Structures are given as structure tokens and as C-alpha cells.
Amino acid sequence: MPGVTKKPRTIRPGSYLGGALGRLLPASIPFRYFGAAAVYHVLAWVALFAGATDVPRFQGGLGWPLAALHLVTLGVLVMTAIGASMQLVPVATRQSLHSPRTAAAIWWLYVPGVAATSLGMGLPSPPLLAFGASAVAVALATFAVVLARNLLGARGMPSVVAHGVAAWLSLAVLLVAALSLAFAYAGGHGLPRAVALALHVPFAAFGFLGMLALGLSYIVVPLFTLSEPIDERLGLASCAFAVAGLCAAGVAASMLPGVAWRIAAVVAGAAALALHLRVMRAALRSGMRRDLGPAFHFVYAGWALLALALVVALALVLRAPLERLPTFFGVVLIAGWLLTFVLGVLQRIVPFLASMHAARGRHLPPTPSSLARGAPLRVLYVAHFVALALLALAIATDRAILVHAAAIAGAIGALAFALFFANVMRRMAEAKAIALAGSATA
């Protein structure tokens, strides 16, 4: 009506998820995984500093560079993937997690398993590595059972579910390949080393971690931009291309060198990324929230670095005459794409979940931005990208001193992120205490 001013639409924590508050896990479950990831993030840069002289030419083998790599992959990326998927996959499937106690038990097995695995690589100690790898494998197998039970009978978000199934299958391949590599150092038997390596990298980075990252993006990006639901057809098409690429990589591993199959894998991966970015672009353009903050700069950088990783992968397949290209590929893939993307998502999802937990029993819960305020994220923003630049320069120039500098910058950023996480936990606890005091007074 003329002269009547409409009230601006208000979005409260949890309202956008449409009933997901009822499927919210106890705060201790996802946050214990995110907290452990913050600790292992710091330790990864420490391990990189310890092995700095071997990093520029690193192409495998036991030592601190391998330990740093797995502190990132197992300690930060997989740790975050487990915590995030246990909370977000039930949102997509519209059914609660069957056993929160099992989710907590996995943490108690997985965290020391990662520590033993990384220490066994760094010292090196093949028996300790084999012990840690066994603990990690049991924890991940248990997680796979929990994930499978939640994916069965899913009633929503088919593209997210499809990516989850692909991640689940990739995890099965990854466990076989990883255990073969770990027990080979201790004199055990499994897949031939060349085959295990050819399976391990694509099914770990692009398969398990990559499919979870792409799939869960269809929840978190529309959630934080307040956009319309994604185009499921494009999401499923992206998933199909990604699965085709993984299948091609699997065939290539069984018939080394398999150059044609590897090229097909890269091309399929590029098609999957193009469709995924089209979906993400639509979410960003239709979103009600325009100011997405520095956290989304990490997300954008992660997408760009994934595209770069595919270009470098193609150069490797075509045998480009660059001696340290494999090392550069590892940096772009793991520290570039996956770590950068995960840090961007965690900057949003940690305060958002904390706000949802603090919202219980309150009429005016704290906003995620109030829980995340402070300088630590600004320090992380600068330190992380400086560390990546220095690490790339170190590989290009073959200078260990630049690796030391990159490790110091990365550690500063990791400590800043840990402080950010601790601040959010403290503010969430304070908000819940105030709510309890108010309820008691009433």
C-alpha cells in the first residue's frame, strides 16, 4: 500500500536451514574436530620448518616434509571434513545422525592416530607409522559406516548426496592405497607401490576431500549468501563429470603410465569444475547477502587454485620439462586449493554453528559476526597468502631459507586461526551462561 514501509526481512540463526536446528549435534562433536584441526594446522607448519631443506625437491619418501603434508591432509582437511559432514550431511538428507556417541568415539581414535602417523613419518619410525595408519584407517572406516547410514534413505539435496556417495567410494579406494603404502615401509604387502601412489593422490585430494568440498559447498555457499537453492541438474552433472574423472584416474593407475586416461581424467575434472563454478556463481548472484567479507576471498582463491592445480596436473601428464613441477603441484593442490578453501569455510561455519548453539533458549541470540569479531582473522588473511607465495617462490628458486620463512608466516596464520577459534568458543560459552542465568531468574 502507498505510504507503508515494509520491514526488512530478518534472518535468524538456523531459520534458513528450515528445521535443521532439530538435527543440530551437541556442540562438543563438531567443535572438537574443528579444534583439533586448528592444532594440527599449527603443527603442520612446524613440521614444514623442520624439513625445510628437503621441501623444494620433495617428491615422496619418509621425513618431515611428508609429515607436514599429512598433518595438513589428515590433521586439518580430513578432520574438518569429518566434523563438517557429520553436521551438514544430515541437513541435506533430512534425517538426524544415528549415533552422536559414535561420532565422538571416532575423534578419540582418529586424533591420536593422526599424531602417530605423522610422527612415524617424520622421525621416521615405520612401526609407529603402521600403528598410526591402522588407527586412522579404523576411525575412517567407522566414519564411512556413519556416513553411509545417513546417506541411505536421503530425502533431499540429491546433488549433495551424490557427492557424498562419490566421496564415500573414494574413501574406500583411498584406505586400500594408503594402507598399502604405510605397511610397505614396515615390510608388509599390498598393492604395488606405483599403483598405490597413482590411486592415493587423486582419490585422496580430488576424490574423498574434493567431492566433500564440492558437495558441501552446495549447502554452505547458499546458506551464507542467503540465495535460492542450487540448480540440482547442474550439480548432478558436475558430480557425474567428477566421477568420470576419478574412474579414468583409477583405470590409469592400473595400466601405468596410462597417459590418455590421465588426460581424460583432467579434462573431466575441468568440466566438473566449470559446472560447479556456474552453480556457485548463480548462488552468489541471487544471494540476499552481498558483503561476504574476507572469508569468501579464501573461497574464491581456493576455486582459482583448483583450476591452477588442474592445469599443473595436465602439464605433469604431458611431461613438461620442469624438475620441481610435482612439488609445485602438491603445494597448489593441498596448501593452495584445499587448505585455503577449508580455512575460508571454517571462518564462517564456526561462528554460525556457535550462534545456533547459543540460540537455544534465547529470543535474541548473538550474531555470528559478533562471535567472530577481532584481529585474528585479519592476521590469518595476510599470513596465509604470504606463506603460500613464499612456498611457491621457494620451490621455483630451490631455496630452503624461503621455506623457513613460509613456515614462520604459515605458523603465525595458524596461531591466529587457533586464537579466533578459541575466542568464538569463549563467547559462545558466555552467551549460553547469560541465557541460563536469564532463564533461572525468570
Image (cartoon, grey):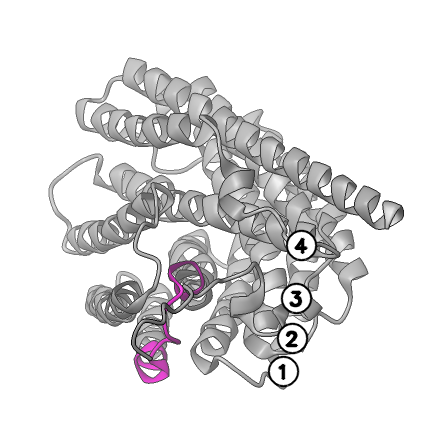
Q: Residues within 10 Å of mark 4 (few under 14, many from 20)?
A: many
Q: Is residue 380 magenta?
A: no
Query: Among all residues in the image, which is located at the extreme front?
Result: 3
> Measured along the vertical axis of the image, is residue 260 above or below residue 135?
below
Residue kind at label 4, given as amino acid type: Ala
Res. 408 in view: yes
Q: Which residues are magenta?
A: 222-237
Q: Which mark is residue 21?
A: 3
Which residue occupies 55% across, 46% down?
A: 351
Nearer mark to the viewer, of 3 and 1: 3
Mark sitting earlier along the chain (3/2): 3
* Tag 1 residue: 152
Q: Secondary structure at mark 3?
A: helix
Q: In the rendered image, which quarter is residue 145 located in?
A: bottom right
Q: Is residue 234 magenta?
A: yes
* Tag 2 residue: 150
* Tag 4 residue: 359
Q: In the rendered image, which quarter is residue 242 located in?
A: bottom left
Compute the Cα span from label 3 to label 1: 21 Å
> Measured along the vertical axis of the image, is residue 75 above or below residue 102?
above
Nearer mark to the viewer, of 2 and 4: 4
Residue 9 shown left or right of residue 119 in the figure: left
Compute the Cα span from label 1 to label 4: 30 Å
Res. 190 in view: no
Q: Residues within 10 Å of mark 3 (few under 14, many from 20)?
A: some
Residue kind at label 2, given as amino acid type: Asn
Q: Which mark is residue 115?
A: none
Compute the Cα span from label 4 to label 3: 10 Å
